[in-house]
Image (cartoon, helix red, strand yellow):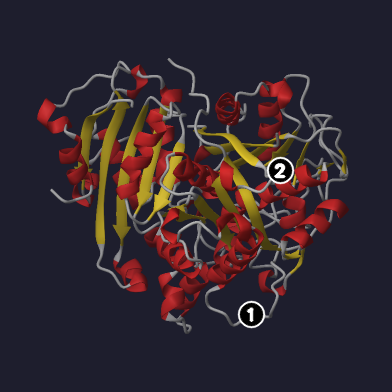
Amino acid sequence: MPEPAANSYPNVAIAGCGAISAVGSGVAALRTALRANASGLRADERFAQPRFQSNIVGAALKAEASDSADDPAFQLADEALHQACAASRESISAVPAERIGLVLSTTKANIEAFERLTDGRPCSDAARRHLQGDLLAADLAVAHGARGPVQCVSAACVSGLIAIQQGAKLIQRGAVDAVLVVGVDQLSAFVVAGFTALKAIDPIGCRPFGRDRCGLSPGEAGAAIVLVRGDLAPPGATKISGWGSSNDANHLTGPSRDGSGLALAIRSALAMAKLSPSEIDYVNVHGTGTPYNDAMESLALQTIFGAAIPPFSGSKGMLGHTLGAAGVIETILCVLAMEEKLLPGTPRLSVAADGVPASIVREPRPAASLNRVLKLNTGFGGLNGALILSHD
Amino acid sequence: MTDLVITAASQVTPDEVKAARLGPRFGRLDPASQLALLAVESLGIEFEKLPRERIGICLAARAGSLSTDVEFWKGRDALGGPSPTLFAYTLPSAAMGEIAIRHKLMGPNLCFTGDDRQVLTEAADLIRRGEADACVCVAVNVVSELAGELIQTSPASWARAIFLTRDGAGIPLPLEEKERRLDSVCARFHGQA
């Protein structure tokens, strides 16, 4: 069998980012949280016990109170896109609208409308329309002047990384010159009740890779990245160098115990980026805080890197698990870390579990070199995703 | 440019699901997963003879997981809350996971909601880029009465599947030449023939 083809396509780079999450609105808020190793998790009375397993969640700090809004998915995505488009104005201002695409990453789109309609509460036509992710994507594209191809990726918690790779592919095969990649999922009774049913929520807030970890913390975010063809990118922009995805083919809700599926996705990404494992400077892991996920990721890292696992850390103690937005906002954190030459920490980790590789980063610290970063996500359905970011 | 070949195509309905015997787990799956699994089974591909790390899955769920969302959310006021088993199927990509589990397919995965026309384009791209040697392409649409009321559309249930491969990948080509024609099979996949 042939090896996956090395990436001989045009460069794709990140021209600008935007995010609204539990640590605030704007990339500056994310940067501040990254430096401080801060956590945005806090109690939220909407998710009180006993109906829900925990009220500790990563609720987005919205610019304006909007509890009555029936379309929070559109609002979060729209705000993130405004920020990302403003940040990349110089790169995309001359690109014709029909040469700009949009890829949305979401697991539940506007689930708020679903809850309202099934409860018999008022819901606008637009909010109802955004129950369907593809229509939400189409309306976001219209709102942000993207008249090229539009896609809605929904691949569980790997959606964000797959959306970024889809955006890169659209550019590489010449369909467009720029792609707005936006990830969004909102906190909802539907999702928190689901994770409660699975007993997958840590009652005191997630502790990724911790000795006493026992679950995730639900979160919400809107996160956007503007991808452009390399020649349109600003100097020093972060490049998308490689990616891979795979399936454990093992279990619908549990990861494979040996990490072989995730290792397969990492190998594909390394092959596309023409990199050896020793050239990776840092890994941002999925790190949900569930016992099985974190153990599986540790094994996958050992499989790929052997005894020389690069520094790695996870970001869900900062943001919560933002589902369809996770891959996008955690990639933005990686971009900021590369700009700052700062290894991100693992918020809310105190005592690491036995077997966690020693190279885990607890607190942020300066990096001698941070030019090749590997981003990982995994999800229900046995899905695995890997993305490699690079600086020249 | 890599030459692509369609080696099999199928289409299934809920009536065929009722008659299907695909093992003890099959009856516990949600309708979208059942339809998708049966459509893939109907392709007649002997996956165990193929390099399963090099076979991708590309799925479009036209109405997402809305019908299963409705069933899951009916249990919100039940003692003990909604079903944990159903929660796993409130993701449009659940059917893709079930296909991978049944046939041990570990290659790249793509899942879209809405328009299924992008499935073949993206599957072809996966193969042409060398990320996979072959791809199981599935379009599934499940809209129950209640889900249809939410999105103001008519109930519907069907799934279609295609097996797309790189010519020369060593995969058997059981279809007749005229049946393998891309335009003919694509039209059937998109429900236009």
Numbered mark located on residue A239 in the image: none
- Residue A125 located left or right of residue B165: right
Numbered mark located on residue A236 in the image: 2
Q: Is residue B49 above or below residue B175?
A: above
Between residue A383 and residue A223, name the one nearer to us.
Answer: A223
Between residue A318 and residue A348, name the one nearer to us.
Answer: A318
Query: In the rendered view of the protein, which quadrant contains the C terminus of chain A?
Result: top right
Q: Residue extending furthest front?
A: A94
Q: What's the CA distance linking mark 2 and mark 1?
A: 38 Å
Can you give x and y, in whole percent of width and height, for residue B1 in the image?
Answer: 33, 27
The residue under the point 53% across, 78% down is: A70
Check the residue under mark 2 and report the chain it is in: A
Query: In the rendered view of the protein, which quadrant contains the N terminus of chain A?
Result: top left
Q: Amino acid at mark 2?
A: Gly
Q: Amino acid at mark 1?
A: Ser
Instruction: Classify 10 Å Cα crowding around label 1: few (below 14), some (14-19), many (20 and above).
Output: few
- Residue A50 located left or right of residue B74: right
Q: Is residue A345 visible?
A: no
> Which numbered disc, 2 or 1, marks the residue that appears first in the sequence?
1
